[in-house]
Amino acid sequence: MLARFRELAFLNAGIRITATDERVDPVRTKSFCYEGGIVSFVKHLNKNKEALHPEPVYFTANRFEDGAETASVEVAMQYNDGYNETLVSFANNIHTPEGGMHETGFKAALTRVLNAYGMKYGLIKEGDKVSGEDVREGITAVISVKLTEAQFEGQTKTKLGNDEVSAAVDQA
């Protein structure tokens, strides 16, 4: 339960969540508040790793249709010296361990942007491309989307199915 409270505090920057266990003597209280939101979440996930750049990259964007906001996207990421990819995603504060369209959009955009940068500055030869797996090696990323009409696949809500959120994350 405390892990879920910590997640919610990370996902909602500045909110304070306090849990008190009155079943024990003395009573134990644990409080969570992260002003940095998902940037703090990435730092927390990387706490036992050597970060390759001092601060996580952070961006946010909103998607509008017919003048109304239909989605907001928030992403924080930081590379570390490890080989594993740590990608944690949420839709409306619900953890989506099987990913979904928000992760698909993030992966596609990250690969496209880093390949374009490499080509532009001569770091990648013409005709060569870096694979998505290579681009994500050593990355820790948190993706949080908030949607007015979230559509999950299956009853367990472990995978986000909204096609339009892929484009929203990709564009962000």
Image (spheres, helix red, strand yellow):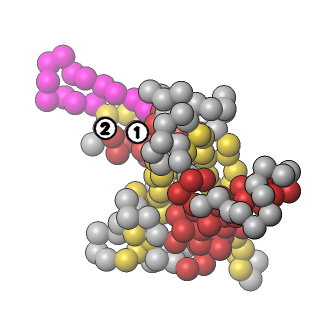
Q: How far apart are the two marked residues, 2 and 1, measured between alpha carbons?
A: 6 Å
Callout 2, which amino acid?
Leu
Callout 1, which amino acid?
Arg
Whether the magenta-drawn stretch holds residue 151 is answered as: no
- Seen at 60% across and 78% down, the residue is 164
Please say if 29 is above or below 147: above
Disc 1 crowd, CA 10 A, few/some/many (<14, 14-19, 20+): some
* Magenta residues, start to end: 20-34
Please say if 30 is above or below 95: above
- Residue 6: image tag: 1
Residue 109 left/right relative to 124: left
- Seen at 59% across and 40% down, the residue is 79
Residue 39 percent across, percent down from the top left? 59, 39
Residue 75 left/right relative to 63: left
Residue 57 seen by the camera: yes
- Hey, which quadrant is residue 158 in on the image? bottom left
Please say if 44 is above or below 148: above
- Residue 2: image tag: 2
- Seen at 37% across and 34% down, the residue is 18
Q: Secondary structure at mark 1?
A: helix
Residue 143 percent across, percent down from the top left? 54, 55
Residue 153 left/right relative to 85: left
| Foreground pick, 153 / 86 | 86
| Quarter of the figure with the C terminus | bottom right
Q: Is the Cβ of the residue at disc 2 closer than 8 Å to that at disc 1?
A: yes
